[in-house]
Image: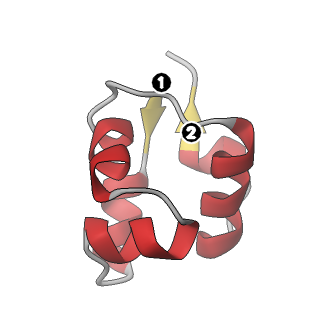
Amino acid sequence: MKNKIKVLRAEHNMTQAELAAEVEVSRQTINAIETGKFDPSLPLAFKISRLFEMPIEDIFQNE
């Protein structure tokens, strides 16, 4: 699944560790999502979308 998390983090001047702390997962989980090795659970996708104040569909795209 493609996503815009890396771009959104850069726009908000956040590190992977900062984002991970905000959504209560490990930095490794954020890295795996950004690189497409892991698809987030629906609750995690909602947390990320609320944090960036964007609809889930604008952050995550099914390939």
Query: In the shown orientation, is residue 9 left or right of residue 24?
Result: left
| Earlier sequence position, callout 2 versus callout 1 | 1
Label number found at residue 1: 1
Vertical order, 28 against 9 (above or below): above
Query: In the shown orientation, is residue 52 left or right of residue 26?
Result: right
**Residue type for callout 2:** Phe
Query: In the shown orientation, is residue 30 left or right of residue 62?
Result: left
Would you say the residues marked 2 and 1 are in contact, meaning their CB atoms lie under 8 Å apart?
yes
Q: Residue at x 37, y 45 (%)?
A: 29
Q: Residue at x 27, y 48 (%)?
A: 28
Vertical order, 60 against 20 (above or below): above
Viewer can see residue 53: no
Are there few (<14), some (14-19), or many (20+) residues within 10 Å of tag 2?
Answer: some
Quadrant hosting residue 20: bottom left
Q: Residue at x 64, y 49 (%)?
A: 44
Viewer can see residue 42: yes
Vertical order, 59 against 10 (above or below): above
The CA span between labels 2 and 1 is 7 Å
Query: In the shown orientation, is residue 46 left or right of residue 4?
Result: right
Q: Secondary structure at mark 2?
A: strand
Are there few (<14), some (14-19), or many (20+) residues within 10 Å of tag 1?
Answer: some
Q: Secondary structure at mark 1?
A: loop
Expressed as whole percent of the image width and height from the top left, the position of residue 51 reads: 62, 73
Label number found at residue 45: none
**Residue type for callout 1:** Met
Query: Farthest residue toward the bottom?
Result: 13
Pick whichever, 54 or 25, lies toward us: 25
Label number found at residue 60: 2
Expressed as whole percent of the image width and height from the top left, the position of residue 12 reads: 38, 82
Expressed as whole percent of the image width and height from the top left, the position of residue 25 reads: 47, 57
